[in-house]
Structures are given as C-alpha cells and as structure tokens.
Image: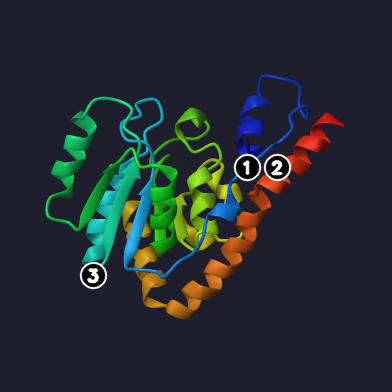
Amino acid sequence: NSEFTKKVVEKNILKNKGFVLHPPIDIDNLISSQKEKLILSVARFGSPSHPKRQDILIEAFRDFSSLVSGYKLILAGGVVEDGEMIESIKKQVGDLNIEIVTNPDFNSLRIVYGKAQVCGQAAGFDVDEEKNPDKVEHFGMTTVEAMASGAIPLVIAKGGQKEILSSFPELLCNSAAQIANNTAKLTKDISAQTLLVNKLFSTAKQYSQSVFSDKISELIR
C-alpha cells in the first residue's frame, strides 16, 4: 500500500517483485465546507499494536492554545478495547477545549472533515521505523481524506506519510512542539493556508478510486 511497505516487505522476498497499490480514497464524497476554528484527528483509540498517540496531539494542542486562542480539537475514532484508554485521555485533556468522539459513522466524519482547518496524526511518534516498521503509518488514509476535504494535515514524519506529503516538508513533524508551532503558523496566515489547501487537494486526487481502478487494471494485465 506504499513504497515504505514495499521496502519493508522486500527485505524478505525477491527485490522489485512488489507492486504498490495505494488504498482507494473516496475523494468524490469528501467536500470542503465553511471552515471553522477546528482541528481534527481521526484515529483508533487504544490500539496496543499500533498506537495512534492521541496523547501527543493533546500536548501539541496545549502548546498551540498558548499561541493561538479560540480553537477546538476533536479526537475522533473507533474504540477497540475497554474504556480505560478513553478515561486516560479525558484526564490528560483536563480543561482544554477538546471533544472526544467515539465510533463516529463516515457521514459524521465527512462533515467534520469539511469544517476542519487542520488535521493531526501522531502515529509513529518516537518510533524507529527501521526497527519497528509496524508501529508507523504504512500509508495514511486519514491524511488523504483530510487533504480531499480542504484540511491541512500535520503528521509525524515516518512511514507512508512521508510519501504522501513529500512535496510538503513543512507538514512533516517530529515532536508535539513542532506540530503546535507549525499549526500556529498556518492558522495565522490565511493566504498561505489557501494556497496550500489547493495544492494538497491536487495531490489527494492521485489516490482516488478511479486511479485505484486504473492500477488494478495494470496489475492484472
């Protein structure tokens, strides 16, 4: 599903035998609506084998809130274990303007994506991707969904995320502080934000369902 995954897999099989087939993203059903002072993260809660690190995003939002006021962070995702993870997150959130949304349906996500200015993703934080490639994002579907919705993704610079955002190094981060500072810069510069959104949307179209179909046809020929 990415050049990153291909590289990892080909350590144990014949080289150049893999075929990269990016997951199809439903670009046509994702829209950009009136933007609000909203930051979104879409990721599973409590995934021990592949932690999404919402804790890092909360710390980043805490730092960001000391630089820019009036924003809200929504942490949305499926719950894959008991409520202990959610309770831990709630304690960390404290009085920050953060909403936790569990098990949202796609239409609800689609609406929030459209309103969000920024989307954060912290999976892979503090992970050595050479030693533990399973703990980073192998592709980054929510990153592309954000781009198709007119939201700017800020992600950890690991795994497949680096491929999706190879033309946008300013969106690749390595710490909570960097996520906070880069988000602050973006939200303060509307003209730069608009230009970036347009470029990101063009990139997102490379992962559409029609492109996926074309690659399937190429694979089976």
**Residue drawn at (45%, 67%) of the image:** 33
Q: Amino acid at mark 1?
A: Pro
**Residue drawn at (46%, 57%) of the image:** 153
Neighbor class of circle 2 (other Cα within 10 Å; few <14, some 14-19, many 20+) is some
Give the residue pinned by disc 2.
212
Q: Is residue 59 visible?
A: yes
Q: Say whether disc 3 or disc 2 marks the residue closer to the N-terminus.
A: 3
Image x and y of residue 44, in percent: 37, 36
Q: Amino acid at mark 3?
A: Gly
Gap in angstroms between the C-alphas marked 3 and 2: 39 Å
Q: Amino acid at mark 2?
A: Phe
Residues at marks 2 and 1 touching, judged by CB atoms closer than 8 Å: yes
Would residue 170 be found to the left or right of residue 84 on screen?
right
Q: Which mark is residue 208?
A: none
Q: In this rendering, is residue 105 above or below 30?
A: above
Would residue 127 be found to the left or right of residue 61 on screen?
right
Give the residue pinned by disc 1.
24
Neighbor class of circle 1 (other Cα within 10 Å; few <14, some 14-19, many 20+) is some
Would residue 86 be found to the left or right of residue 128 on screen?
left
Q: In this rendering, is residue 210 above or below 181?
A: above
Mark 2, secondary structure of its residue: helix
Mark 3, secondary structure of its residue: loop
Q: Is residue 173 visible?
A: no
Gap in angstroms between the C-alphas marked 1 and 3: 35 Å
Q: In this rendering, is residue 111 above or below 158?
A: below
Of the pair 175 and 154, the residue shown nearer to us: 154
Give the residue pinned by disc 3.
70
